[in-house]
Amino acid sequence: MQKFNLNKKLWVTTKELVKITSISDSRLYRYSKEWEKGGNDLRDMGRMTLKGKNVSYLWDLRIFANWVLKYKVEQPIKYDYELAERETLKKFLVYNNPPVNQERKAI
């Protein structure tokens, strides 16, 4: 996992997001598909699409960190693998100390 200042860089590529969060490509893909299948907009996860010669995705780290906290960390666990996923996600959130956590502590 990489220490990353969420306040310095707003947009990152999917490759950078995977490196920063230690979330695998397949898990990120699964999260995106589950979210989309539920009728939600991927922009709520922080993903933006740039159209051009090569279609690519950019991620807003602050929105993604908030989404992870709300929809993956704070949700009840149904299956065993979700416990391991939650621990990985908590490490990302605590290690990088996003502003989302600071706001929650103040409440």
Image (tube, rainbow, N blue to C red):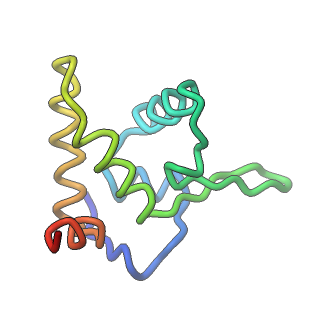
Image vertical order of residue 26 relative to residue 12, above or below:
above
Name the side, left or right, on which 104 lies relative to 39: left
* Residue placed most toward the observer, 101 or 56: 101
**Residue 23 on image: x %, y %:** 34, 43
Looking at the image, how many numbered discs can be counted on the residues? 0
- Up the image or down, 55 lies above or below 37; here it is below
Task: Say which of 56 and 82 sits in front.
Answer: 82
Instruction: Give how far across and how far down residue 81 sits, in percent.
Output: 21, 22
Which residue is painted at 44% across and 38% down in the image? 28
**Which residue is found at the position 38% from the left and 79% from the top?**
7
Tell which residue pokes out farthest to the right in this image.
53
Measuring 51% from the left and 36% from the top, which residue is drawn there? 32
Left or right, 14 with respect to 74, comes to right
Residue at the far bottom: name it.
Answer: 8
Dividing the picture into quadrants, the one containing residue 62 is bottom left
The N terminus, quarter of image: bottom left
78 and 3: which one is in front? 78
Looking at this view, name the residue that lies furthest to the top: 79
Q: Residue drawn at (24%, 67%), measured in percent from left and top?
A: 96
User: Residue 49: image x %, image y %?
Assistant: 70, 53
Q: Is residue 72 above or below residue 19?
A: above
Q: Quadrant of the C terminus?
A: bottom left
Residue 65, above or below 5:
above
Which quadrant of the structure image shows residue 33?
A: top right
Q: Position of residue 10 (x, y in %)?
A: 50, 73
